[in-house]
Amino acid sequence: MTPVQAEKRLVELRAQIARDDELYYKKAKPEISDFEYDANKRELEDLEKQFPQFAAPDSPSRVIGDDRVQGFKEVAHRQKMLSLDNTYNEAELRGFHARLVRLIGTPNLTYTVEPKIDGLAVSVTYEDGRFVRAVTRGKGDRGDDVTANVSTIKTLPHRLHGVAPKVIEIRGEIYFTAVEFQRINAERAAAGEDLYANPRNFAAGTVKLLDSTEVARRKLEIVLYSLGFCEPAVVESQTDLQKKLKAWGLPVVEKYWTVDGIDEAWAAIGELDRLRHDFAYGTDGAVVKLNDFAQQRDAGTTDKAPRWAIAYKFKPDTARTRLLGITIQVGKTGILSPVAELSPVVLAGSTIARATLHNEDEIRRKDIRIGDLVEIEKAGEVIPAVLQSFPDERPRGAQEFDLFAAVGGKCPVCGGKIARLEVAAEGAEGVAWKCQNYDCAAQRAGRLGFFCSRRALAIDGVGGVVAAKLVELNHVQDPPDLYHVTLETLATLNLGTTEEPRIFGEKNATKVVVAREAARELPLEKWLYALSVPDVGETTARELGRRHRTFAELASSPLLHAVLKKAELVAQREWEAPASRRNPAKSDEDKARRKELCARLEAEIAALDAGPLAGVPADIGPAVAGSTLEFFASAPGQRLLAKLRALRIDPRGTVPTAGVFTGKTLVLTGTLPRLKREEAEQKILAAGGKVSGSVSKKTSYVLAGDDAGSKLEKAKELGVRVIDEAEFLRLLK
C-alpha cells in the first residue's frame, strides 16, 4: 500500500469506526457485529503503525468509546475507567503473556480467567458501606450518572454486608437474563411491535431511559467483578476481591479460575467456552487478568486500556446456508422490513429458517443477493442475523436486491404508495421505505396490538394473531373500534382455518371485555401512547399528559405551538448571526443590523423559556410538537377523536394542581394492597407531587407496600417518613 492509499484508507476507517461508535455507544443500535468492528479497529491500528506520519491523537485507536448521552448529569470517576484490548486468537494471547513477562521480570505469573459479560459497563460507588452512585464508563474519566435507574436492580444491595471501606468504586456490567429478554420480546411480538435485537443493546438503552419507573419494570441485572478507587485498600489480588465482593453481598461472576501461567489460562478459556451457555448472562469472551494488584501497578496502563489484562473474544456461533428469498414485513408505523428466507440450518441448538436483514441499505452494503450462500449468526445469541454473502459462490444472474422493484413500487399488504423517508421509528432508525396508507391492514393490526399491549392500555389477549384477525374480518378499523366488538363475536373468533379451527373462546373474550372497560379510567398519557401518535414514545406521552387536561386541549396545544415558535426563532437567530457560516455578514453595517436583530430574537426566546416553556423537558421538542399537532389535525387523527367522543371516553391528564403533595417528592416501593403502582403515581401527580425512583434526603415520603426492599431500609436510615396505602389515601382526602 502506498502512502497515498494508506492515508485514504485511514480516513475511511476512522469515519466508519466513528459512525459505528455512535451507533453502539450512543444509540445502542449497532449495524455490524463485534467481529467486524474489531477487524476494522485492528486494520486501523496496523496502518497507523505502518504509516506513523498519519497517526492522529484523537484516532479511535487511542481513545475510549464515549457512551454519554443528553439528559444525564456527568460525574467524574475517582479512578479512570478503562476499556480492554482484545484478541480472537491464541498466538496474540501468548504474546500478551510474553510482554508481561518482560515488564514484570519473571515468567511465574498468576492470572485470573473470568467470563466477559456482554452488557453495559458501569461503576457503582459505596461510601461507608452505603450505595450512593452509579456511573457509566462514559469517556473514561467521567460518565453519566444513572443512579436512579441502577437503584431499581433488586440484586444490588443498598448497604454492603459486614465491614466495608470508607469509599470504594466497584466496576461491573448491567445485563438482561435471556429469560427476561425473551419475556419482553414475547410481549412485543404479541402487540405487533418490533422485537429488540439483542440483550446487550436493550440493556444499554434501558439504562439510559429518563424514566426509572419504566426501567424498574424491565428487571435489569448486574454483576460486579473489578476494582476502581478504594480507600483504604482492603484487597491485594483479584482472587481476594472476588471473595470480598461475595462477602459484601454483591452479585458476582458465577465462575472464575485462578491459574499459573498462560498454558493454564488457555485451558481455563476452553473450559469457560464449554460452560458459558448455562450462565445467567450472555458472554462473548474471557478476560485474563494478572492476579496480583502490585504486579498490575507495575505493568501500568495505556491511555485506553490496562497492560495487565486482555479479553479473549469467542468467535460467534455462525452457520452457512442458502438465501432462498427475501420477504417484506410491514410494521405498525408502515416501515417495510426485509426478512431473509433461508434453507433451514441448525445454529446454537436451534433450527433457523428466517433471519433479519435490517434494511435495504444494509443488504446493499453487504452485497446480499437471492440465491447467495450466506453466513448467519445469532446476534446476542437470540435473534439470527445475516452477516455476509459469498460472491464467489453466487449463482449466475443473481441481481442486486431492489426493495421498490421487489414489491412492485407499492405496499405488499394494501397496495398503497410507498416512499423512501428518513424515519426514527423504533427498530428502523435511518432511511427506510414506508407505506403511506394509514389504513393499511398491516398497520391497523399493528396499532391494535400495540393499543392493547401492557405498556399501553393493558387489554391482555389482543396480541398479534388476534389483532390481525379482527382487522382481517373488518371488526376493527381503528383501535377504539374494539369497544364495539361484542362478547359473542370475540368468543367465536376463529384464529385458525376452516379445516383446523382455533376458537378464541368465551373465557378469553370475557377477559378482553373486562380489561377494555377498566382502560376507560386510564389517564391521558396512557391513551396518547396507545394511539401510536408519531414520535410520541412512552416518556414523551407522560410529559404531554402532565401538561394537558384532555385530548381536545392537546390537539390545539398552545404549549406545542410555543415549542415550534421557539424552534423557528432559534433557526432564524442562527441564520442571522453575523458569523453564520452559511450566511456571513456582508459589511459592518449588515453585521450591526444583524447583531441587533439577534438580540431581539434572543429576548423572544428567553420570554418563551420563562413563560409557556418554563420547565418543559427536552423530550417535548419541535419534532414531537410538530408531529402531534399534525396528527390530530389530520383526517385519521380527527376520526380517532370523534370515535373516542362517541364512546364517551375522555381521559384526563395528570396536570399538577395545588394539593397535599405540592412541592413534595414520593418514592414507591413494594406491592400495594389495592392500588396499582401506576394508579398511585397518577394520584401523586394530580395532587401536585413528584415521583422519584430513588430515596434521598430530599424525599418527602416513601409509600411502602408488601415486599418493600432496599428503598424502605434507606428511608429508615435517612429518617424519611414511611406511609402505607391507607395513610396515603387519607392524606389525599
Image: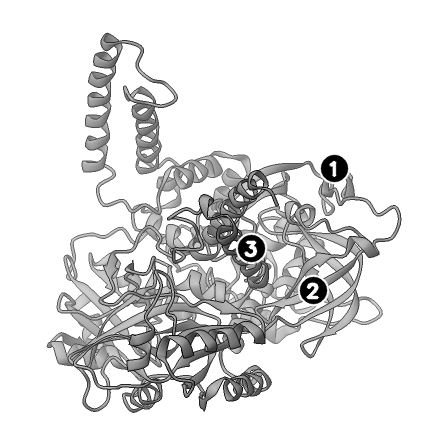
The kind of residue on which mark 1 rests is: Gly
**Label whose residue precedes the other's in the sequence (2 or 3):** 3
Residue 211 in the image: state x and y as whole percent: 34, 60
The kind of residue on which mark 3 rests is: Glu
516 left or right of 343 in image? left
Residue under label 3, please give it: 43
Image quadrant in which the N terminus is located? top right
| Element at label 3 | helix
Residue under label 1, please give it: 409
| Element at label 2 | strand
* Residues at discs 2 and 3 in contact (Cβ within 8 Å): no
Callout 2: 10 Å neighbours few (<14), some, many (20+)?
many
* Residues at discs 1 and 2 in contact (Cβ within 8 Å): no
Residue under label 2, please give it: 376
Name the front one of labels 3 and 1: 3
The residues bearing labels 1 and 2 have C-alpha atoms spaced at a distance of: 29 Å
Residue 111 in the image: state x and y as whole percent: 42, 85
* Residues at discs 3 and 1 in contact (Cβ within 8 Å): no
Name the front one of labels 1 and 2: 2
Residue 558 in the image: state x and y as whole percent: 31, 34
Q: How many labels does the image show?
A: 3
| Element at label 1 | loop
**Label whose residue precedes the other's in the sequence (3 or 1):** 3
The residues bearing labels 3 and 1 have C-alpha atoms spaced at a distance of: 40 Å
Name the front one of labels 2 and 3: 3
> Can you say whether 575 is above or below 228 in the image?
above
Residue 298: in sight, yes or no? yes
646 left or right of 150 in image? right
The kind of residue on which mark 2 rests is: Ile
Report the residue that reaches farthest toward the right: 396
